[in-house]
Image: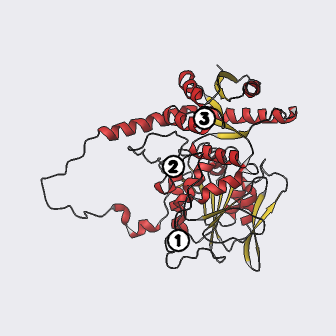
Amino acid sequence: MSPYRVLVVDDSAFMRAVIKDLIEEDPAFEVAGMARNGVEAIEAASRLDPDAMTLDLEMPEMNGIDALEAIMASNPLPVIMFSGISEEHTSLTIAALQQGAFDFIRKPAASSPPGEISTIGRLLREKLHTAVLIRERMRRQHEEAALAAERAKTAKPRQPDRRSSVPPAGAGKSGTERPDAAAKPAGRTAGSPSAAAPKLPAAKPEKPAGPPSARPRPEAAAEPKAGRPAASKPLRPAATAGAAAGSRNFEHLIAVGTSTGGPRALQELIAGLPEDLPAPVLIVQHMPPRFTASLAKRLDGAGPLTVHEAVDGQPVMTGHVYLAPGGNHMRLDRDERGYFIRLSQDEPVSGHRPSVDVLYRSLVPHGGLKRHGVILTGMGSDGAKGMLELKESGAASTIAESEESCVVYGMPRSCVENGSCVTVLPLSSIAKELSVRCLG
């Protein structure tokens, strides 16, 4: 089998050589070409058609963010960003992930010790092995979206039937508007042989086709142009009567776990949750320290809910979202005043800190709550054991993102295969499902 071909993009000749050497330590890969800036990257991606790309953020002529946008619009492929750890770099990296980059890795410095560079190389090769597996799916979905858009443009409007002016019985009413149907959460039961696989929503013809890893973006979640400051939080309408935003008294609680592809998935999920959601939302996203602060800031503008990077001892309230800080496990705890966040730097669990398993297991003792576990796109199996314990303790719902919409169908697959997730849905349906379950 021929090795997978990787395009390396960096303005530093030294760094290009380092990255090339790290990649080619694995005979499964070869560096097919190199580029010094975003302009060269776009041309090389089109000419070489690589299986994956590494991309620097800051480069002359055209930076990595603008190059990523152009590549994803014309020739989508898995892109791994190289990022520094400054506040500006972490913010740009999160923007790139929300724009469709597959993953990121910390960029080594020229002065980095050999052991650190070796670790970065190992992580890079692990990410590349996963990235190249989704290349064909990305290409196929991109072509299907483009074809659907072209068909929509050329389709002739359907002429009304003029043979009768009498409207048919039930005209103006949709079969989905039955009161009993509205009360039932959507979804299929995992393992049901008669359940049809959920379909992703069709591409909107008025917008150019995005990359397959670029999830459908609700209009409410339209993100600011990457690389620019996030737009200020939208003005909130008056609270719905009976809403309990900011209350420490609640019956429902939502816990979400995700990894690769998570920043974009979380943006869509949070954008779809209503302001009067009578539940707090706790999230574990696999991400190193410093990056989660930037992610929380960007997610805070996605919808009406307030998003925080969680703080130890912080009260948990409805209408608020709590993101576990990188390098810290997050648990739910309770005292006489109510529920609150408990952070720790205990040893990694399932290979991660923060760990999704740790979050889910912390919900098990709180059987008085209607607990909703959600597992989204990500590599590995973190969350599967904790989700099973949560389900067995009487969770109100356990939901996995379907393979069709996952960037990487690893963590959700593990939860489906061990029987812990009862409901399987595409990302675009999960916020509505949670809203129906929590609001009734």
Q: Amino acid at mark 2?
A: Pro
Residue 291 location, x and y as percent? 71, 50
Q: Is residue 339 above or below residue 83?
A: below
Residue 259 location, x and y as percent? 67, 48
Residue 120 location, x and y as percent? 78, 36
Q: Is residue 150 above or below residue 248?
A: above
Q: Which mark is residue 193?
A: 2
Q: Which of the pair 44/87 is nearer the observer?
A: 87
Tell me which residue sits at (64%, 45%) in the image. 92
Q: Which mark is residue 78?
A: 3
Q: Is residue 121 left or right of residue 376?
A: right
For numbered disc 2, what is the local secondary structure?
loop
Judge depth for marks 2 and 3 and give the one in front.
Answer: 3
Q: Which of the pair 2/310 is nearer the observer?
A: 310
Q: Can residue 383 be seen by looking at this rendering?
A: no
Pointer 1 or 2: first along the chain = 2
| Residue ID for mark 1 | 439
**Does the residue at mark 1 contact the one at mark 3 (Cβ under 8 Å)?**
no
For numbered disc 3, what is the local secondary structure?
loop
Tell me which residue sits at (65%, 29%) in the image. 9
Q: Is residue 385 above or below residue 57?
A: below
Kindly give the residue lying farthest to the top in the view shown. 2
Q: Which of the pair 187/58 is nearer the observer?
A: 58
Q: Amino acid at mark 3?
A: Pro
Res. 372 image quadrant:
bottom right
